[in-house]
Image (cartoon, rainbow, N blue to C red):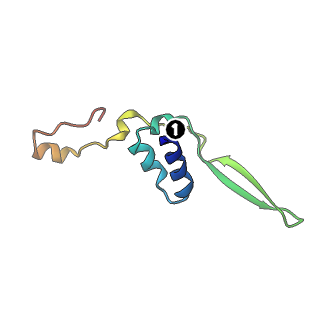
Amino acid sequence: MREKIRHERFIELAFEGKRYWDLRRWKIAAQVLNGKQFNAMYITKNANGTYTYKAKPVDGVPYVFQEKMYFMPIPQREIEKNPNLKQNNGW
């Protein structure tokens, strides 16, 4: 059922910029995003009025999502204000 809900959100919220935050909230970003390359769509109008679509890598560098990225670092200034705070793992 969980997979069906995730898939439904993927479809319903397409192009709304919520996918990344869903992946982080569900803690599956490392499995889904690591190694992915983002593409841009190049659209060319042909002489006969049709269009040709071609995906090309944006920068050619695969995306890296580390486990520590699920939690943002606590600013050093806040840690200095409250010595009971401890920096999140990995930062």
User: Residue 28 versus residue 45: which sits nearer the camera?
Assistant: 28
List the residue tagged with mark 1.
Answer: 32
* Residue 17 position in % (x across, y down): 48, 57
* Residue located at (28% from left, 42% from top): 73
Amino acid residing under circle 1: Val
- Label 1: state its secondary structure: helix
User: Residue 8 versus residue 45: which sits nearer the camera?
Assistant: 8
* Residue located at (85% from left, 67% from top): 49
* Residue located at (26% from left, 37% from top): 88
Q: Residue furthest right?
A: 48
Seen in the image, is 60 located left or right of residue 50?
left
* Residue located at (49% from left, 42% from top): 1
Residue 74 lies in quadrant: top left
Q: Residue furthest bottom?
A: 49
User: Residue 9 versus residue 59: which sits nearer the camera?
Assistant: 9
Q: Is residue 69 above or below residue 77?
A: above
